Image: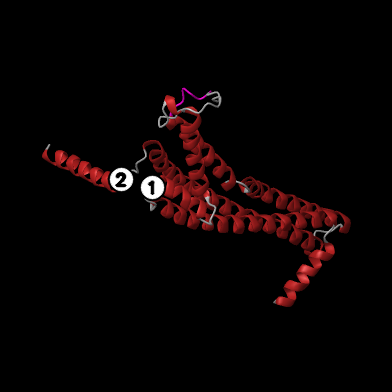
Amino acid sequence: MQTGESSGLFIFIQQADAASFVVILLLLFMSVITWYLMLTKFIQQWRANRLIAQSSDIFWSAPSLSAASLSLEQHAGVDSFTRMARQGIDATAHYREYVHCPLVGPSEQPDKPQPDKPDEGVTLSEFVTRALRRAIALETAQLESGLTMLASIAGTAPFVGLFGTVWGIYHALINIGASGQNTIDAVAGPLGEALIMTAAGLAVAIPAVLGYNALVRSNRVALFHLDSLAYDLHAYLTTGARINTQHFAVRNKVESLSVKQAGATS
């Protein structure tokens, strides 16, 4: 069985022309790029999720905002939440220093000339929201890098294989015309080449499609989690107090029970 497969592959390589070799090399290059992108992106997302969980636990376990900011600077792992939190903290400090400084009275203002305040009409909530949205946009672009190439390979690989199939059928018709007889010997080689091209195109396209869909879903889940962390971070930076998630969970449970009881009595 192995001898037949080796001889069949040898015959295919021996009979293939320049166009067939170009198609095979192109599909091989697409396959290498596909598996490289899938492996690197999945490893990158796995590490990012692990670091986000660690850094968010460190941040929310800090007793104050200054301590949380210091813990982020000392935290070795650079992840999406760390970068987003730094953007929010820097935006809050910038707003209180240059746009609105409620802690410094008029008599305590320094003698140095004050900078212009183009964002004087912007509230702290809007200013922090812009910073967090910019951070999330940057993280989204980083997560989606490489997906365009993966989608392009998934969409074009079948057509590249189809071109090889058409080229093999063309060779089969040329052999029939040259031999003058419709025998299996005249068309076996070119038709086998056509089938190999079709299978190669599908072998490249199917993993690319599955990997693209899996990465898109994983990115959607990661961005949803990052967006929920951004809401909590926004509330913490603008109000100075953390959201009591346990209080909200208890309140939602009580409200749902009240709705069920009202529905039962009606």
The amino acid pointed to by label 2 is: Asn
Residue 244 - label: 2
Quarter of the figure with residue 44? bottom right
Task: Give percent across and percent down for residue 240.
Answer: 37, 39
Left or right of 189, for residue 256: left
Comparing 63 with 150, the one in front is: 63
| Residue 140 screen position, x and y as percent | 55, 43
Q: Horizontal placement of 150 versus 164: left or right?
A: left
Pick the residue in front: 210 or 181. Answer: 210
Placement of the N terminus among the 4 image quadrants: bottom right
Q: Main secondary structure of the magenta part?
A: loop
Q: x, y (%) of residue 103?
A: 40, 32
Q: In the image, what residue type sits under mark 1?
A: Ser
Instruction: Describe the element under mark 1 as helix, strand or loop.
Output: loop
Mark closer to the observer (2, 1): 1
Q: Residue at x 52, y 26 (%)?
A: 111
State which quadrant residue 261 falls in.
top left
Does 120 appear in magenta? yes
Q: Residue at x 22, y 43 (%)?
A: 256
Which residue appears at 71% of the width and 50% of the height?
162
Residue at the spot x=51%, y=41% of the render? 87
Residue found at the very far left of the displayed protein:
265
Q: Badge 2 local density, few (<14 within 10 Å), some, or many (20+)?
A: few
Q: Identify the image quadrant of the C terminus.
A: top left
Instruction: State the CA–CA distance, disc 2 to disc 1.
Output: 15 Å
Which numbered tag is attached to residue 64?
Answer: 1
The single residue placed furthest to the right in the displayed view is 178
The magenta-colored residue range is 118-123
Residue 93 covered by magenta stretch: no
- Mark number, residue 50: none
